[in-house]
Structure formats: structure tokens, C-alpha cells
Image (cartoon, helix red, strand yellow):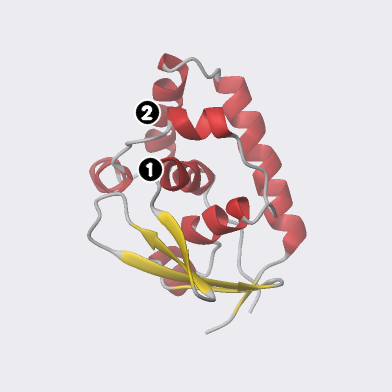
Amino acid sequence: MRLRQPPRIKVLEALGAIADQRVRKVDDHYEVISSEGDRKYTVSVEGNNVSSDDNGTRFRNYVGYPIIAVLMLEGRLPYDEELAKALAGIPWRKLNEEMKDYSKVEEIVLKRAEEKGVKRERVEEFVNRVMENVRRLGLNKVT
């Protein structure tokens, strides 16, 4: 099954996971720890076939942030160190649950990045570039 495009916010969430050092390679797969540290997602990537047990990938059939983070670390998707550092420490799950609207969460995150010296335009351009690369990859969900 071909996975759908993720919500834009998931690109930023992936950067935050990398900046917080919540992504690690374990044998032939990766483990991604949630922003609150209470969940662990298992991600496997073999070519364009991917699997992850995060909710977005598993139940909504879109490319979840753990997959995006892994593909960034593998060099298959663009990565921006400065932008990632600006997104460190964000309580993603808390924000998503409180706001119940990804566009509102994205606005909060964009303001935070600007406060840390990363212009909104740069963030939006980066997200657009990653989204286009995700589309080009045409990732397939395997179970």
C-alpha cells in the first residue's frame, strides 16, 4: 500500500525528534521515542518499503514523523541542523492534544523557530522541499 503525504507539521516533528536525540539505530531497525518519552516506535526501512507503528502510519496511512526522521538520518531526505536545534524540546504530543489542529501547532512552532533566529520563510521552504522529496520517494507501507 502506498503511503499518503504526511501533514506538514510532521516534517518539523521529525526534526525535533532528531534534535532531542530520540532516534537511534538498533540492529536492522530504528527506535524513535515519543516527545513525552512514554512511547517507543519501531521503524524499518528497506528501499522504498517502510514500516512504523506510530499512529499516523499505522492507522491513517500517511508517512509518520518517525519514518521522516529515519530517512533524514539516512540522508534520503533533506536535513537542516540549525532548524532542528531550534525545534529541540518541543512537547509535540501535548501541543497536538491541546490545539487539536495541526495548523495551530505549526504556528506555535514557527514562532518558536523565529525566536531562536530561524526565519519563517526558511522553515516553510524546508518543509516544502521535504514534502516534495517524500512525494518523489513514493513510500510503500509494509506490515
Q: Position of residue 60 (x, y in %)?
A: 46, 68
Point 55% across, 17% down: residue: 119
Crowd tier of the residue under label 2, counting other residues whose Cα lies within 10 Å: few below 14, some 14–19, many 20 or above? few
* 69 shown above or below 113: below
Q: Amino acid at mark 1?
A: Asp
Write down the quadrant of residue 109 in the picture: top left
The answer to which quarter of the image holds residue 68 is bottom right
Q: Secondary structure at mark 1?
A: loop
Query: Residue visible at 44% across and 27% down?
Result: 86
Residue 5 horizontal/vertical position (percent): 61, 57
Relative depth, front residue between 18 and 132: 18
Q: For mark 1, does the 10 Å Cα neighbourhood hold few (<14), some (14 to 19), or many (20 or more) residues?
A: some
Q: Is residue 19 above or below residue 107?
A: below
Which one is in front in this view, the residue at disc 2 or the one at disc 1?
A: 1
- Which is more N-terminal, label 1 or label 2? 1
**Residue under numbered circle 2:** 108
Q: Position of residue 62 (x, y in %)?
A: 54, 64
CA distance for labels 2 and 1? 18 Å
Could you say which quadrant of the image residue 71 lies in?
bottom right
Q: Label 2 sits on what residue type?
A: Ile
- Do the CB atoms of the residues marked 2 and 1 lie less than 8 Å apart? no
Q: Residue furthest right?
A: 136
The structure residue drawn at horizontal position 49% and vertical position 42%, both measured from the top left corner, is 15
Relative side of 116 to 95, left or right: right
Q: Which residue is mark 1?
A: 20
Outermost bottom residue: 143
Q: Does dot 2 land on a helix, a strand or a loop?
A: helix
